[in-house]
Image: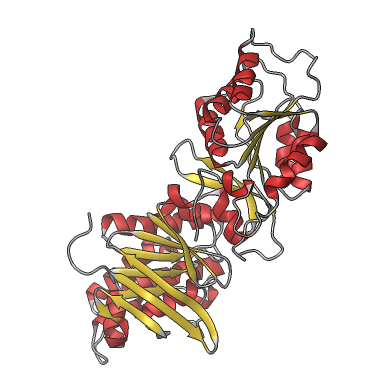
Amino acid sequence: MNPPGPPPLELETVRAVYGERVALRGVDLTVGRGTLVALAGPNGSGKTTLLRVALGLLPAAVGEARLFGTPVDRLPIAERARRVAWVPQSESPRDDVRLFDYVLYGRYPHHGALDAETESDRTIAIRVITEVGLADRANDGILTLSGGERQRATLARALAQEAPLLLLDEPTTHLDIAHQLDLLERVRSLTRERGIAVVAALHDLNLAARFADRIVVLSRGQRVAEGPPAEVLSEELLLRVWGVASERRLDPRTGVPYLIPHRLVHDEPGRGEIAGFGPIHVVGGGGAGAPILRALADRGFRVTSGALNLLDTDAEAAEALGIPAPLEAPFAPIGPEVRARHRELIQAARVVVLGPIAVGPSNLANLEDLRSEAGTRPVWLVRENPAGAWDFTGGAASKLVEELKGLGARSVRDVPQLLASLQPLASPAPPGGHGSDRDARPTGGVELG
């Protein structure tokens, strides 16, 4: 629980402009003590602008930014520096001062103009230099450092301010993966051990999900999503805001979600639209689903796949097409985690298609999950070879298919007939009408406004 008192940072219906260009459009944001908030969004979405408004470097055209309850434009520069520290995207020092002296600059807000640094200041500078892993470079010139080392030096200078609010603009720029993880681990520990509030603009959504308490997503100057990583990170988010098709998975060690990007869908990422009708969820396996996946993707439908085994022909097709598919180990029965993901995809679908698959004990769970979610959305059964042997479960699969038919599932003979049957659903409803698109609205997913 956050201690009493005004929050470190508040933005209230902030509108910010550069000349005639609107950079932020009515953005609200509250950052509590001891929390790490990640700002995410495409290039030009307003992340840096938001930080500049919070610092008072760019005045809000409408609305207000407050630091610990005080409007930022009412705070003298020195007082702002005591309340908030900033790490910019990049900084190019002109003089080759010692790293130690460069970090010591961060202590200036705590002294008068003519005051010399104290032993306490020097102790703090040494401590933060050590914390960012640059103790062996303390006496080297700042210009001799690599880009990644200089980024860590800038962080050390900000930490030397000992401000209760820290703003980071792309802090992992120029850092290799090891130092990205190291830096964000250190920043995360500041929130937990010292109660510092942190706002970090990050391009990498997976890093944001791993370290942040909350993720705020901006698109074209508007806040389009906000919440804990488990709620915000979704395939729909990446498609809607960045125009990238992806697959969402959970890290089995931490339970934190992450996204595997597959392919660019939009010509103009970030335009705020989802391409095509869907999702259409295809239950396949053994190659029976691949022709359906390809045909639907070629027509511009959004597609997801049922649970598949790695190395399955359908799994390879789904990967090539950028179609999300829960994957199980080769030849293994579908496990509970994969089944949970499968049910999520069914719940998010507008239409479900069951391909002409052979069903045995290892993949019967696909039909069981489909049956448990049936009756709430249209279901099509593609039965290309109805006379062939396909049920190897002692009749359990056949019973489930008959139950699906009893709930309204429709049979089509092949993929062309399936496409013809789906076309009316994807067509816009007439004015004032309620077409099938609306009637088959998905029950899951993340609303982004």
Please, is residue 230 above or below residue 12 in the view? above
Is residue 398 toward the left or the right of residue 415 in the image?
Answer: left
Image location (x, y in percent) of residue 404 = 61, 24
Please, is residue 2 above or below residue 88 in the view? above
Image location (x, y in percent) of residue 331 = 66, 20
Q: Residue furthest bottom?
A: 114
Image location (x, y in percent) of residue 157 = 38, 73
- What residue appears at the point 58 percent right and 55 percent down from the top-left corner? 238
How many callouts does the rendering have? 0
Residue nearer the viewer, 178 or 312? 312
User: Which image quadrant for residue 87?
Assistant: bottom left
Please, is residue 35 above or below residue 108 in the view? above
Please, is residue 410 above or below residue 390 in the view? below
* Color encoding of the figure: secondary structure
Residue nearer the viewer, 294 or 192? 294
Is residue 417 something one can see in this rendering?
A: yes
Residue nearer the viewer, 398 or 376? 376
Quadrant for the N terminus, please: bottom left
Image location (x, y in percent) of residue 232 = 46, 52
Is residue 412 toward the left or the right of residue 52 in the image?
Answer: right
- What residue appears at the point 47 percent right and 73 percent down from the top-left corner? 140
Is residue 363 something one can see in this rendering?
A: no
Is residue 183 toward the left or the right of residue 418 in the image?
Answer: left
- What residue appears at the point 74 percent right and 24 percent down from the top-left corner? 356
Is residue 68 toward the left or the right of residue 399 in the image?
Answer: left
Q: Residue furthest top?
A: 394
Q: Residue furthest front?
A: 432
- What residue appears at the point 71 percent right and 27 percent down from the top-left corner? 285
User: Which image quadrant for residue 80?
Assistant: bottom left
